[in-house]
Amino acid sequence: MSTNFNSIGVFAIYKFEMSRFRRTFWQSLVTPIITTLLFLLVFGSAIGGRVGGIGGVSYAAFIVPGLIMLTVLNESLSNASFGIYMPKFTGTIYEILSAPLSPAEIVIGYVGAAVSKSVLLGLLILVTATTLIPISIKHPIIMLFMLIFIAIIFSMLGFIIGLLAKSFDQLQFFPLLIVTPLTFLGGAFYAIDMLPSPWQTLSLVNPIVYLVSAFRWTFLGESAVNIGSSLVVISFLFITGVILIISIFRTGYRIKA
């Protein structure tokens, strides 16, 4: 295995994954945007008129960060998990493992492509939302960094799911039955300080709460959860993802068997 960084090999994986993104343009890009806009119209217009403003902004502007997170988390998971699962399913994973690529380079190729797709989608949703409602971003640079970093975390998680999954059913189980409900319960459509005391405390067990709160903080400049606590949880999730990927490649679990 080469000790130098194999940029050609990494770019080959990245280019292949991005070409799959172009081939499924409507499913990968247009459909999530339309779905998010429907959420925005239903919750922002129909329900927002009754709810009023939250945090000094309209309800529609309040839920935009949550909608972006909802889409980015799901797309990061699905793109990364499907990207690495298909080589396992078809048996071409062995060609990748036998290539002069280190585990880190393989991860960078697949995760990098998933992050690129998710961030592009998140930014397109943001741009589209700004054409419908007035949105201000108090920390735009931090917002972009946070968007990329959270996409990296969930792309790594999706990569792990793709490595461990034995079937397409297992591939869909975690995103649909765990991540999506946690995202809806993670303050995407409401502020957790609006909840009664017992439920507000229980919400803090949900890691998605910290992701959504930190991302919303970049828009509003304030959050129901302390930004320092959110950064600690985000860092913990990133480190945990790195450790799990290293362990899987080191043991060859569900890869070489």
Image (spheres, helix red, strand yellow):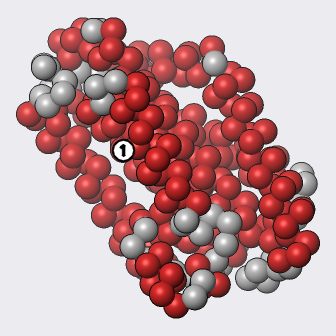
SS at mark 1?
helix
Q: Amino acid at mark 1?
A: Leu
Q: Residue furthest bottom?
A: 197
Lateral position of residue 35 relative to residue 17, left or right: right
Residue at point 30% right, 64% down?
236
> Does any portion of residue 242 appear in the rendered image?
yes
Residue at point 80% right, 47% down?
37
Q: Position of residue 31 (x, y in %)?
A: 72, 32
Residue at point 86% right, 79% down?
52
Lateral position of residue 29 relative to residue 21, left or right: right
| Residue under pointer 1 | 157
Lateral position of residue 64 relative to residue 117, left or right: right
Q: Position of residue 179 (x, y in %)?
A: 47, 51
Q: Position of residue 85 (x, y in %)?
A: 36, 23
Mark 1 is surrounded, within 10 Å at the Cα level, by few (under 14), some (14 to 19) or many (20 or more) other residues, namely many
Question: Which quarter of the rendering shows the N terminus?
Answer: top left
